[in-house]
Amino acid sequence: MAQDFDAIIVGSGAGGGVAAWVLASKGWKVALLEKGRSAYPSLGAPVLRQSLWGNDELRRRRFFGFHDPFIEPRTIVQAAGGQAEQKEFQGLGVTVGGGTVFYDGDCPRVTQLDLRMLSTFGAVPGASVVDWPISYDDLAPHYDEVERLIGVQGAADADPFAEKRNAYPMPPGRPAKVGTLLSKGAKSLGYHPHPMPMANNSIAYRGRPACVDCGFCAMGCPIDAKGSTAVTVIRDALLTGNLTLFAECCVTKVVATPKGDHATGVEYLDKDGKPATLNAKHIILAANAIETPRLLLASEIGNSSGLVGKNLMFHMVFAAVGTFEEEIRSYRSRVVAHALADFTVPDGSADYIRGGYVELGGQIQPVEFGATLPRQVHKTMMVDGKFRRKIGSVSMMGEDMPQEANRVELDPKVRDVYGRPVARVTYVRHAHDQAVVDRYMPKLTAIAKAAGATGVQEVDFVAQDGVPESKHLLGTTRMGDDKATSVTDKWGRMHDLDNVWVADGGVYPTSTAFNPTLTQQALAHRMATYLLNPAGQGKVTP
Amino acid sequence: MLAAAPALASCRRDDAAKTAPDASDATTTADAAGEIGPAPTPIGRWLVPQGTTLSKERYAMLLSVMDALIPGDAASPGAVDTHAAWYLDQLLGAFKTDPPRIYAGGPFSGRHGGIDAFSTFQPLTRIETLRWRTYLEGDMGLPERQWNGPVKGLAQQYADGLDALNAASLKDNGKGLAEIDADAVGNLLDAGDDTLVQLVYTHAVEGTYGDPVYGGNFEQKGWKAIDYEGDRQPIGYTARQMSNPEEG
C-alpha cells in the first residue's frame, strides 16, 4: 500500500508535539492531526505573526480552543455502582498545542522513587501498583532535551528532594508576593520551598520574549512567552518542511489489518466534515488519557489485555485557601512561582504512602471567581472585602492509586457533535487517597497560617460533591513488560500492534507525586527517538 | 467589527429623569451621560435601549432580575450599571454580524499598547458555527443540530424563564417583573426556578467583569469596583508591582 506519511500523530498537545519534532527533524514525513483549530495565522512561516489568544476570560469561558462539553459531552460515575451523569470535567486544550496552551507550565521532574512504588513500598490492597519498566536514568537525557526545546526556568540546586541535574535553560523568573510569603511560612515550619520549574521564559529564549507575568496563563499566552508545543516544537517541525499540520480534523478510527496486529492508517473527518483517510507506516496516539482509549475502544484494537481505558488516574488536587491582611494580588504573576517537594517523601504512616508536590500560589480571575460564588455573598466577596486581592492558596498534587475500576469506556447513549460515542469515566477515590487528603490538608493549612493567612478554607472538590479537575490525565494505556498486565511496552508501543504508539499520559503505570506534563514530553521524546532508530535503544544523539 | 454600544449610559429610568425629564415622550433624548441617541423605550422601572435581540418587554424584565442579583450602590456599580443585560443580549444576537460576536480577536485590547485587536471578532470554524447556532437558537428541527437529542436554545430558555417569572410577579404583586422593586424581585427569585436564576447570575457576572468588548463592563466599571486592572498585555506587571502590590 502506498504510504502518505512515515508517521501520523493524533493530537498536537504535550506528547504529540514533541514526537512531531523528533521525527520531522530527522527527515520523517509526518502528519499531525488536531481536532481543534489553530490560533496562529502563520505557525509555519519564517516570521511568527501574533496569535488569537488574549487576556480575556470570556473567550476561555466560551471554550475557544478548549474542550467544549456542549459539543463533546462526557459522563462520569463517581461512586461504586453509581449512575453516569453528564458533567463538565477534566477539559484540556483542543487546539494546536493542546493542553500546553492553557497549562500553568509547571515542569517538575519525577524521582527514581516515583518509578519504583511496588518494589519500594509493596502492594496496596485494592490498587494495581506496579514499578515503571524504566528508570530515572532512562528519562534524564530526554528531560534535558525537552527542557531545552520548550524552554524551562528553574534553579538546579534549590530542591533537596530532586534528582541531581544540570542547570536549567533559564534562571527562575521574578518572585510573586504570594509565593514569597508562603515560602517564608513554609520555611518557618522546616520545609524546603524553591522556585517552581516552569515552561515560561524568564528571559528571551529562542526567539520568544520573556514572560511579563500578566496572570492570564490559563487563557493562552498572547506573547508566546509560555513554551506551548505550538510555538516551540510544532513550529520548529513545520519549519523543517517535513511536518504537515491537519487542524480541525477529527480522527474517528485507527484502521488495522483484520488480525489486528498492524495499523494501516486513520479515518478522520476533515475541516468540512467530510470523511477522509490517511495511511502511514506508524501511528502515534497522543490525544490524552481519556481521548486515546476512547479512540482505541471505538476502533476495537489493542485490547487483548482488557486494560485499555483502565487504571485511570487524576491526582488528588486539594488546597488550603487563606486571606492575607496585606495586598497579595496573586494574579500579578505566572500561575505558580514557588513549590515544595517535602511531602513527596514518605513519613512512615501505615495508612498511606506519601503525599505529593505542593504549589505555593495559584490565582483566579474575577469572572471565574465571581461565577463560582453563591450569589448571596457576591457583593461581600467581590467588592466589600477586596477578597480577591488578598487570597492565596497552597495546593497539593497527591499521588492517587491506580485501580482497574477507575476507567474510561464508551458511553452507550451520549454522542458528540461528530456522531461518536462519548467517553464515560468512572473515578472513585481509593481509601489510600482519602487518607492522603485527610493527613496533608492540615499541613497545607499550617503553611498558609504560618505565612500569615487567616480564615483558611480547606478545599477538596471531589469530597465536596464536585468533579476531579486536576487536568492531569494518566494511566489508561499503562506501560509494562508483560502484555497480560499492560497495554504498551517500555517504549510506548502497543503490545498488540507493531506500529501503534502512545505518546500521552496514558502510558503512566503509576501517577507519581508530580505535575505530569514534562514527564509525558520526556516519554514522548524517548519513544520517538527509539522509533527513529530502535538499535539506539532510545539514546539521545546530537 | 466594532462593538455595538447601547445608546444610553444608564437603563435606570430615575437616572435618565435627572437629565431628561421628558424621556418617556421624546423620540430622541439625552442619556445620562449627555449623549444623543435613538429614544429608549420606558418600561416599568427601566429604559430599554433600541436594537435589542430580546423583546423590549423581556429586556426590561432581565434588567429587574440582574439588578436584584448584583445590585449597585453609590460605591460600586451593579449589573445594570455595567450593562450586563446588554452583554447577554449581544450574545443572543451574536449572529446578527459577520463574523459573529462570539470570540474577540487577539492578542491585545490596545488599552496597554499594541493595536486594538479585540474588537475585530474572529471568524468561526464550521464546528464553532454549528455549536453556537445550536446553543443560541436551539435545534430548530435540523438533524445536524441534534447530535445528542433535541436542544432548547439559550434565547428560548431566557424567553420562557423570564415569562414564567413575570407571570409569578403578576400573580403575587399584581404588577409585572419590570415594575416591582428589587426586594420584590428578590422574593420571586428565591421562590422561583433556580436554573434560570443561576443562568442569569452567571451572565450578570460575565457582563460585569468580562472584557468590555463583549458589550458589558461599561467603562470598565466592573473592574474599577473591585480595583482590578483587567487585561495587562503587552506590558504585564513590573517586578515592583509584583512584589509590592500594596503600592498600587
Image (cartoon, grey):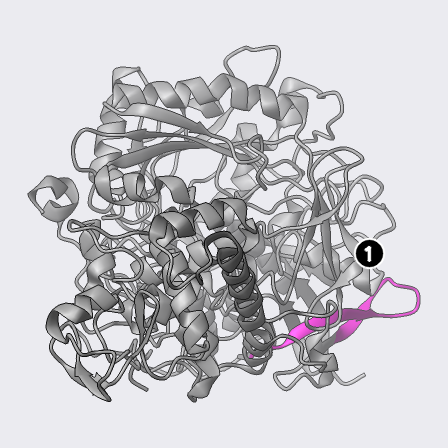
Residue at horizontal 21%, vertical 38%?
Answer: A328
- Would you name the residue on which mark 1 appears? A302
Residue A358, relative to residue A492: is it above or below?
A: above
Q: Is residue B132 within the magenta segment?
A: no
Image position of A297 (left or right of B153): right
Residue A266 visible to an observer of this rendering? yes
Q: Nearer the viewer, residue B106 or B161?
A: B161
**What segment carries the magenta color?**
A246-266
Q: Is residue A97 left or right of residue B135?
A: left
Instruction: Please state if B18 lies on the left or on the right of A390 as rendered.
Output: left
Q: Residue at x 71, y 80 (%)?
A: B144
Residue A151 seen by the camera: no
Residue B105: x and y, percent? 34, 77
Q: Main secondary structure of the magenta part?
A: strand
Label total for image: 1
Which residue is outermost to the front?
Answer: B174
